Image: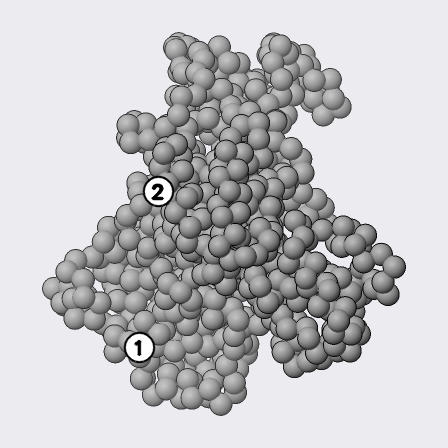
Amino acid sequence: MVSVDVLRSKLKEVFGYDQFRGNQEKIILNLLAGRNTFVIMPTGAGKSMCYQMPAIVQEGTAIVISPLIALMKNQVDQLNAVGIKARFLNSTLSKSEINKIKKATLAGELKLLYIAPESLTKEENVDFLRQAKISFAAIDEAHCISEWGHDFRPEYRRIKSIIDHLGQIPIIALTATATPKVQLDIQRNLQMEGADLFKSSFNRENLYYEVRPKKGIKKQLIKFIRENQGKSGIIYCLSRKKVEEIAEFLRVNGFKAAPYHAGFDPAVRMKNQDDFLNEEVDVIVATIAFGMGIDKPDVRFVIHYDVPKSLEGYYQETGRAGRDGLEGQCIMFYRYNDILKLEKFNKDKPVTEKENAKILLEEMASYAESAVCRRKQLLHYFGEEYDDTHCKESGMCDNCRYQREKYDGQQYAQTVIEAVLQTEERFGMSHLVNVIRGSSNQYVKSYKHDKLPVYGKGKGEDESFWKSVVRQTLLNELIEKDIENIGLLKCTQKGRKFVEKPEYIEFTKDLDFSDVDETEDESNETPASPNPGSSYDKVLFDLLKAERKKIAKEKNLPPYVIIQDPSLQEMATTYPTTPEALANVNGIGMGKVQKFGASFMRLIKQYVEDNEIDIEDVVVIKSSGNKSKNKIYIIQQVDRKIDLEEVAEQKGWSMEELIDEMEIICFAGTKLNLDYYLDQIMDEDLQDDIMNYFMNAESDDIKEAMDEFDGEDITEEDLRLMRIKFLSEYAN
């Protein structure tokens, strides 16, 4: 048996740590003693060390069964970097690579072999492992065994029978998200009922939890990320389409963001992941495919753009924030309609699976809408009781930070307990609420529960109120979930005493999300108004116009050539005081900033100071389009002097659409030399006349120009192209 001193010395030598964390040392010693070990430990608490260290200090190769290819690669790279020989077996490897790994294992060269469950079930791999000296088997993400968990994988059910073929070796099962029901299911499936259980607290004290209404969400996103500029964060979305949309939206609005989902080419996925790890990108927008096993300790925020499918998933995903023990903000945007959407996705699943998914979603909705301490709810879900005094004092969740409406819950809790007892502890929340409210549905009548004393006792309150009461009665340990029968509620000893001798108990009124629209509020893509009742700051706009006139006079140019009115209006909305901010205004690129920007920025800066305007509170949203993609293509084609009709044809555009795109480019300050095309369609004298017109005109309005050249053989398209020529020569 390896001594504690040897373990600690190895810990310092290999990993550079002076001491083990939490239960790590006890777990390692238990496994080294040859005992089956079951570890429940939250994300970021150091589960990997519990199997890596025993593998390092004893003979043979430990097999680590994990469903996460990213995790395997990540951990193997880290182990190899500190001189520990480790490899992985999964579907990404070629035949020759697999043979090399098998050879190294049989030669006793490897300390750890990570293997995907799909690879483990292959007969040739089982035969190979039977020949190797296996020290123990580690089953990571063990909750995948349970059909009651959030991430059930059928191939996990076969693991125990395969391990049995490898001889008498100890097993260590590890998970970061196990409710009491899932815990029981794991133990039974792996035949580990007699295993030593090591359960660490699920409480992550450094994480702040908040649920916000999903309303004006894009504006909220921009404001939040701007307030946390330069910090690393993850935004989770449910669909791949939404991931790409939000990543693009953030980029358009000036943030370093990248998308990540399983539909991307592996090389793109890896690049975006590495950019995030190496701080080339601040924000990664992802489906839940991202982050599993990714060890980035300084993720400062995790945002759920969409509601997750389960509290287990939510806990695991939020757990990626603040793994270094420092600040971690966990923000979830919620509306009930998202729950209904997720329910629709489950409609084609088998009945049992569908019912289970429904229960998980109900738990998720309850968590979001409840005004009780978030931490208390989360920890209770995982079978851990939590005194919320500390959270209240520190304000580490929105429900503890902000005042919520309280009420005396004594009589309501009593009614719930009576309903549980009178229905013989054989029913779940929905049925109990129906009985309390006096519902006359078939189900209630078939059990003759309409004859019970408690029937109709709470008919004065609605369904959502009573569901909230049931949840809070659970949180106060007066009733409990039946572990054996999912969804059923039983009375606790504490609850029985409460019925005999009721006492004051404080309940909290649920949060109201009913005013959140069913459809996502995208109307906030128009500029936000810094001044109530106006779309832009009119005083500043007039000052900017005066400044434009002054510059135009100096340059001997019409004012519209300098900067156009819509751009001035946006400047009077966003108050840009830096070259980057000014270049981000529609119709102004860095070219115009360099040419005309200095005096405008000085004016805005002075105005902001004089009027004590907090520009941090100004949120303007730019909608993402495909214009940026088209820009490079058009500039390249024009530089190559390709006929404009041909350019339009290649893109499947009309000539009008091409000119629209060119105007966007030109108005933003980029030169486009169209002489090669204009010289073909228009004589030199007419071009000179039109250039003189635009030089002396008060505006660049095309209708006014058409009136001026009425009777000439000239079209609206011709005039628009000449306007691009004029602005390219004089404005850009």
Q: Identify the residue shown where x is 45% and y is 54%.
A: 597
SS at badge 2? strand
Question: Amino acid under label 2?
Answer: Leu
- Most foreground residue, 8 or 13: 13
Q: Nearer the viewer, mark 2 or mark 1?
A: 2
Q: Identify the residue shown where x is 49% and y is 48%.
A: 550
Q: In the displayed structure, does residue 471 sit left or right of residue 79? A: right
Q: Quick one: quadrant of the C terminus?
A: bottom right
Residue 360 image position (x, y, % from top left): 56, 41
Q: Identify the residue shown where x is 40% and y is 21%.
A: 403
Q: CA distance from mark 2 to mark 1?
A: 32 Å
SS at badge 1? helix
Q: Residues within 10 Å of mark 1 (few under 14, many from 20)?
A: few
Q: Residues within 10 Å of mark 2 (few under 14, many from 20)?
A: many
Q: In the displayed structure, does residue 412 sit left or right of residue 388? A: right
Q: In the displayed structure, does residue 431 sit left or right of residue 717? A: left
As drawn, 474 above or below 652: above
Q: Quadrant of residue 712?
A: bottom right
For marks 2 and 1, the one nearer the N-term is 1
Residue identifier under label 2: 207
Residue 485 image position (x, y, % from top left): 55, 38
Residue identifier under label 1: 80
Residue 371 image position (x, y, % from top left): 46, 26
Q: In the displayed structure, does residue 625 sit left or right of residue 584? A: right
Q: Quadrant of residue 477?
A: top left
Question: Amino acid under label 1?
Answer: Asn
Q: Identify the residue shown where x is 67% and y is 52%.
A: 697
Which residue is most to the left? 5
